[in-house]
Amino acid sequence: MLKWLGHSAFELNTSNKMLLIDPWISNPNSPAKVKDYYNADYLIVTHDHSDHLGDAVEISRNSGAPIIAVFELANFLNESEKVKTIGMNIGGPLKLTSSLSVFLTQAFHSSTHGAPTGTIVKTDTATIYHAGDTGLFGDMKLIGQVYKPDIMLIPIGGFFTMNPEQAAIAVQMVSPKIAIPMHYDTFEAIKQDPLEFARIAKGLSPGTEVVVLKPGESIELR
Ligand code: ZN
């Protein structure tokens, strides 16, 4: 099960493990409370901006879940916040269990500690690509070829990341079975209509189903 918690935050439940990506659970559109996630097993943080690092430190402290992030960010959090981290880099995999592994991918964005990233999470039922915060870049095509994501989580808010038109081109390059828009409507600067994204993406990539979730809604992995 993959649940959107608003902004770029997702909860993934697979093989009795709970993994959170970019766990800003206290975002303005969140349906959940941070303490609901004190039972998380793993946290992935794509980069150190506060809307992505979010509540990772509090959740890690209370759950013991390690924060998986690019090497420099993982070291920084381990030293400054004394939380458990796993520092890796673009490439991978990090094998968490026999049926769950994590890769980091390139993302075109900025960050203070280490490179900004996207992430691939491979489960025994689906491969998920969370693009992080990123502009459009041509090697998304390579990410599609190498990892063959079933589900792509893609920022459409514009201003800081891709806008709906650019995100639709990204979907065309990656060619996932399902694309889910994220990183919009959290603040004024990133207000967007996800249905406009769905319409353009459908035109460019007819084989992809665009699923527009509301915060708190989920899909089953397939
Ligand atoms: Zn960012």
Image (cartoon, rainbow, N blue to C red):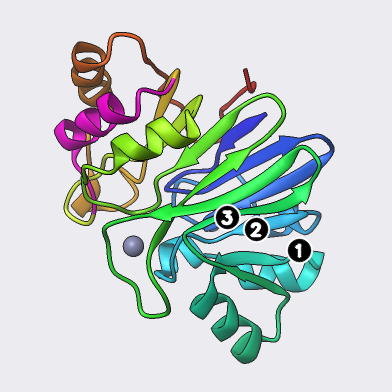
31 or 116: nearer the eye?
A: 116
Please report the residue visible at 75 percent of the width from the left and 45 percent of the height from the top. 18
Looking at the image, do the residues carrying marks 1 and 3 touch, with CB atoms under 8 Å apart? no
Q: Which residue is mark 3?
A: 92
Note whether ligand 1 is within 8 Å of mark 1: no
Q: Which residues are magenta?
A: 161-176
Residue type for callout 2: Leu
Q: Position of residue 207 (x, y in %)?
A: 35, 9
- In three-dimensional space, the C-alpha distance between marks 1 and 3, rounded to whole angstroms, equals 19 Å
Residue 178 is situated, as x and y percent measured from the top left of the image, at 44, 21
Decide which of 147, 114 is in the foreground and name it: 147
**Could you tell me if the residues under marks 2 and 1 are in contact, i.e. CB atoms within 8 Å?**
yes
Overall secondary structure of the magenta section: helix
Query: Which quadrant of the view contains residue 60?
Result: bottom right
Name the residue: 34% across, 54% down: 133
> Which quadrant of the frame does ligand 1 lie within?
bottom left
Which SS class for mark 3? strand
Q: Is residue 51 above or below residue 28?
A: below
Q: Is residue 173 magenta?
A: yes
Residue placed under numbered mark 1 in the picture: 65
Which residue matches tag 2?
43
Residue under the image location 45 percent in, 36 percent down = 146
Residue 155 painted magenta:
no
